[in-house]
Image: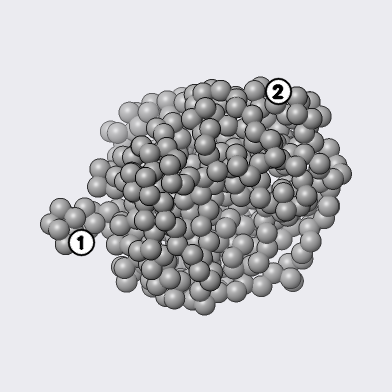
Amino acid sequence: MMGKYNKVLVANRGEIAVRIIKALRELGISTVAVYSNVDKDSPHLRIADEKVCIGDARDSYLNVYKILSVATKYNVDAIHPGIGFMAESGEFARLCEQYNIGFIGPASELIDAIGNKSNAKFIAKECQVPVIEGATAPVNSYDECEELGELIGFPVLLKATHGGGGKGIRIVKEKEKLKDNYNLCRIEAKAAFNNNELLIEKAIQGFKHFEVQILGDTYGNVIHLGDRECTIQRANQKVIEEARCVNIKEEVRQKIYEDALKIAKHIKYAGPGTIEFLVLSNGAYYFLEMNTRLQVEHTITEMVTGIDIVKEQIRVFEGESLSVTQEDIKFDGYALQCRILAEDTLKGGMPSIGKITKWNMPGGLNVRVESGYGCGSTVSPYYDSLIAKLCCKAADKEQAVKKMYICLEEMNIEGINTNVDFLKFLLGKPEFIEGNYTEGFMSKILEEYQYARMNSAI
């Protein structure tokens, strides 16, 4: 569907629903919000033009037919799938096409092609972009997995071919543990993505997680909006994101940009997307995967470029061309994002649920807070533990980290446990400020934090 949207349904919840609804309304587009009974007091409902309850927590946001039913009843022109499962579902995009409802995202065929990690790896190889040693097609059995594991050499990485969010991924350091991890990984993948296909690859160690923000339109224009570093992760879940990576050689950065654009142009990509790489200290790098949607951390790219990625996305799927060219993109300063999580960090990130009794957020120049919660909100056990995104920008990383630390001190959330104290602990580490860390850094800092807390050092 092409042409100006008059009404759009937002098929998501939390802070991203707030973000998208605001962008739509600023563009003069009417909005319909859907929600579960658990989310009846959520902030995104207060700013939407219309709101519809679509069931309980277990049968709402992931129920494709309930969402399509609301879209049809309320005569929407399009559905914005947000950042979750719907945004990466080729099936959902196809159903929208069948019902003549616009899908604010790539075509279903493209989602299927690049969203499948084995296909994506094959496409990267076609574009002569370095890929990690291992299978480019899913393994068909445990025997095949074992054979490839011996050929590649341990440690190996097992990962689901579909989906994202850190689910269905396991590092196996020795052959004796391969079978158990193979079976568990298949179970996780089936539960999360309704598909249990797995890839096996060499497990790369000592890397930075580096991603390039892509933006394309339906006329063949594709640009990049720079990079983000997302190395600070726990259990493959991002905790801190940075724009742009401070500790990488400029010639390597530019080569990765070229390769990311090569892939995006090859598949004729439209909309915002992220192409992810693993980068080693010697300058070697490998294609990891492509996400065909907005990312949680798109905010910090907006802060350093001044480009409203969500509005560009909406306009692109209305049929407009990109409003900017590559030459227009300038990078101003450094930004980082901390994910504020409802959890007990000392208990391995155990989710914290309950009613928020106090909610004071920081503010000021170049401070951005996005959330789907507030004072009186209830954090339920049914959804992701992300309750807010805190973003800060300054001239350089050192100044931005100082600003972020002060903002975390200013933040006051009561009624639930959060990771705020841990984030302050991490930000104080010289390795973080210098950018001198790889994927093993997070585990080390967690151990240090737990030891310090147990010994009342903080």
Give the structural element (helix, strand or loop) at label 1. Answer: loop
Work out which quarter of the rendered image holds the N terminus and state it.
top right
Residue 35 versus residue 458: which sits nearer the camera?
Answer: 35
Horizontal side of residue 359 vs 10, given as left or right: left
Tell me if I can see residue 116 in this picture. no
Q: Which mark is residue 308?
A: none
Q: Residue at x 38, y 49 (%)?
A: 358
- The answer for how far apart the CA atoms under marks 1 and 2 are is 52 Å
Q: Residue furthest left?
A: 455
Tell me if I can see residue 11 in this picture. yes
Q: Residue at x 70, y 40 (%)?
A: 49
Q: Residue at x 57, y 49 (%)?
A: 295
Q: Which mark is residue 458?
A: 1
Q: Residue at x 25, y 43 (%)?
A: 347
Residue 374 versus residue 427: which sits nearer the camera?
Answer: 374
Q: Is residue 112 above or below residue 245?
A: above
Which residue has dot 2 on it?
Answer: 69
Contact check, label 1 and label 2, Cβ < 8 Å: no
Local crowd at mark 1 within 10 Å, few (<14), some, or many (≥20)?
few
Q: Position of residue 127 (x, y in %)?
A: 67, 52
Give the structural element (helix, strand or loop) at label 2. Answer: helix
Amino acid under label 1?
Ile
Local crowd at mark 2 within 10 Å, few (<14), some, or many (≥20)?
few
Q: Position of residue 145 (x, y in %)?
A: 43, 31
Q: Is residue 440 above or below residue 349?
A: below
Q: Is residue 281 above or below residue 29?
A: below
Q: Position of residue 61 (x, y in %)?
A: 57, 30
Residue 232 is drawn in which quadrant?
bottom left
Horizontal side of residue 288 vs 223, given as left or right: left
Amino acid under label 2?
Ser
